[in-house]
Amino acid sequence: MSAASIPSPLWAKPNRCGVIAALDTPDPARAMGWAAAVAPHVGLVKVGLELFCAAGPAVVQQIGQHRPVFLDLKFHDIPNTVAGAVRSVCAHPPAMLTLHGGGGGAMIEAARRAAEDSAGAQRPAILAVTVLTSFSAAGLAETGVSGGPAQQVLRLARLALSAGADGLVCSPHEVSRLRDAFGDAPLLVVPGVRPAGSDAGDQARVATPEETAAAGADWLVIGRPITASADPAAAAARIAATL
């Protein structure tokens, strides 16, 4: 499926939990190789800041030749600036894009309007990042946020969804709480997923693919357990087979 044939954003609500392979590298050739290898086993591939900054916007279309792109740039700025950034990326276009829920309702509304004005029915799904998976309660407290990650995730989720976000990015630890609070409608995209026995790396709030899927996630974002494997295609296939 090419990027040009992406249907409306809610196409990404799968019948069962799927895998997004994170192509975190500054090398576009390596990213293209990974994308080609894992394409039979995943639903989307992630282009994040590292690859986007190294290769530029064209990489979204290039990678999209293999699988639709989850563009994870986490926009966070004044509403006018974020709207302009959304209009720019809609020229390519990704299947889903992220912005920080902490940017506020006006910013999220501006992003949604910009996506609709630029791409219409073919617009990317707008996903609000709640609390990064690297944050613990102590890390949040350093930034002046009290109450811990779960409380902050629910606060930002409510704000984002009321402002027009199609879904949320959260850690595995908050998936069931979000389903209880908001039902099946929001798209839940979940990083911080690690197969049993994998190194958690810099992630603070993690769970296995099976646990995260059972909690109600729609998409699991998995990077190093796939791309650091000697055989990324086989690693992706093994993870997909558990869901």
Image: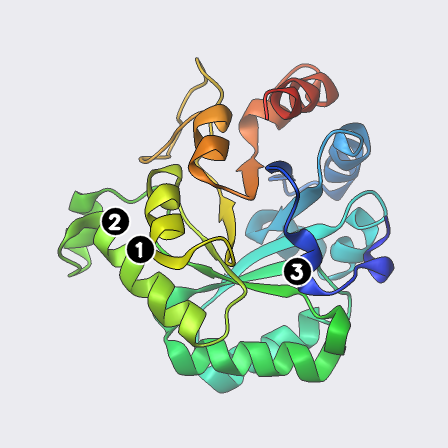
- Kind of residue at disc 2: Ala
Q: Residue at x 64, y 46 (%)?
A: 46
Disc number placed over residue 153 in the picture, else none: 1
Q: Quadrant of residue 78?
A: bottom left
Q: Nearer the viewer, residue 74 or 213?
A: 213
Q: Quadrant of residue 118?
A: bottom right
- Kind of residue at disc 1: Val
**Distance from Cα at disc 3 to Cα at disc 2:** 26 Å
Dot 2 falls on a residue whose secondary structure is helix
Q: Residues within 10 Å of mark 2 (few under 14, many from 20)?
A: some
**Residue labelled with disc 3:** 10
**Distance from Cα at disc 2 to Cα at disc 1:** 5 Å
Looking at the image, residue 243 sits to the left or right of residue 147; the answer is right
Q: Nearer the viewer, residue 62 or 174?
A: 174
Residue 128 horizontal/vertical position (percent): 46, 62
Query: Does residue 95 appear anywhere in the picture?
Result: no
Q: Residue at x 33, y 64 (%)?
A: 156
Colouring used for the render: rainbow
- Dot 3 or dot 1, earlier in sequence: 3
Front of the two marks 3 and 2: 3
The answer to the question of whether label 3 and label 1 lie on touching residues, with beta carbons closer than 8 A, is no
- Kind of residue at disc 3: Leu
Front of the two marks 3 and 1: 3
Q: Residue at x 25, y 49 (%)?
A: 150
Disc number placed over residue 150 in the picture, else none: 2
Residue 56, above or below 26:
below
**Distance from Cα at disc 3 to Cα at disc 1:** 22 Å
Disc number placed over residue 21 in the picture, else none: none
Looking at the image, residue 101 sits to the left or right of residue 2; the answer is left
Q: Residues within 10 Å of mark 3 (few under 14, many from 20)?
A: some
Count of numbered marks: 3
The answer to the question of whether label 2 and label 1 lie on touching residues, with beta carbons closer than 8 A, is yes
